Image: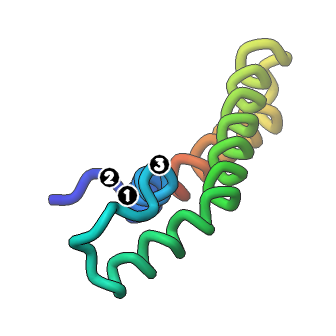
Amino acid sequence: MNILGTQIRYATEVFRAKSRPADAGGISPTELNKRLQLARDYTKVVMQVVISVVGLIGSILLLLLMPKDAATTKLACSTIGLIVGYWLR
């Protein structure tokens, strides 16, 4: 059973490829091209993480600090569910 989603695995691969896009020798050209493509996607993945963190913080603050009415609670919970669902897909 796979608990972590493909998006989390992809982000992990991108961060790993960015830290070491090419090893000195002993790597096939297809593996090198895959690592370089993952390293190119670094900015996109960083922005996905930043937007997700900002959305989660905003939703949690909305739940904690705003008056407890149904619309505000529904909006905050829906946003949290959307973000968590995106990363666990």
Secondary structure type for disc 2: loop
Tell me which residue sits at (52%, 47%) in the image.
84
- Residue 46 position, x and y percent, is 65, 49
Q: CA distance from mark 1 to mark 3?
A: 16 Å
Mark 1, residue position: 9
Single out the residue that lies furthest toward the bottom. 30
Residue type at mark 2: give it: Leu
Residue 71 in the figure: left or right of residue 78: right
- Nearer the observer, disc 1 or disc 3? 3
Secondary structure type for disc 1: helix
84 or 53: nearer the viewer: 53
Residue 33 in the figure: left or right of residue 67: left
Q: Pointer 1 and pointer 2: residues touching (CB < 8 Å)?
A: yes
Q: Earlier in the sequence, mark 1 or mark 3?
A: 1
Tell me which residue sits at (21%, 72%) in the image.
26
Mark 3, residue position: 19
42 or 31: nearer the viewer: 31
Which picture quadrant has residue 32? bottom left
Q: Earlier in the sequence, mark 2 or mark 3?
A: 2
Secondary structure type for disc 3: helix
- Nearer the observer, disc 1 or disc 2? 1
Quadrant into which the N terminus falls: bottom left
Quick one: label 3, few (<14), some, or many (20+) residues within 10 Å? few
Q: CA distance from mark 2 to mark 3?
A: 22 Å
Quick one: label 2, few (<14), some, or many (20+) residues within 10 Å? few
- Residue 45 position, x and y percent, is 62, 56
Residue 80 in the figure: left or right of residue 74: left
Residue type at mark 3: give it: Ser
Does the image show residue 79?
A: yes
Mark 2, residue position: 4
- Residue 75 position, x and y percent, is 76, 42
**Vertical placement of residue 1 versus 29, above or below:** above
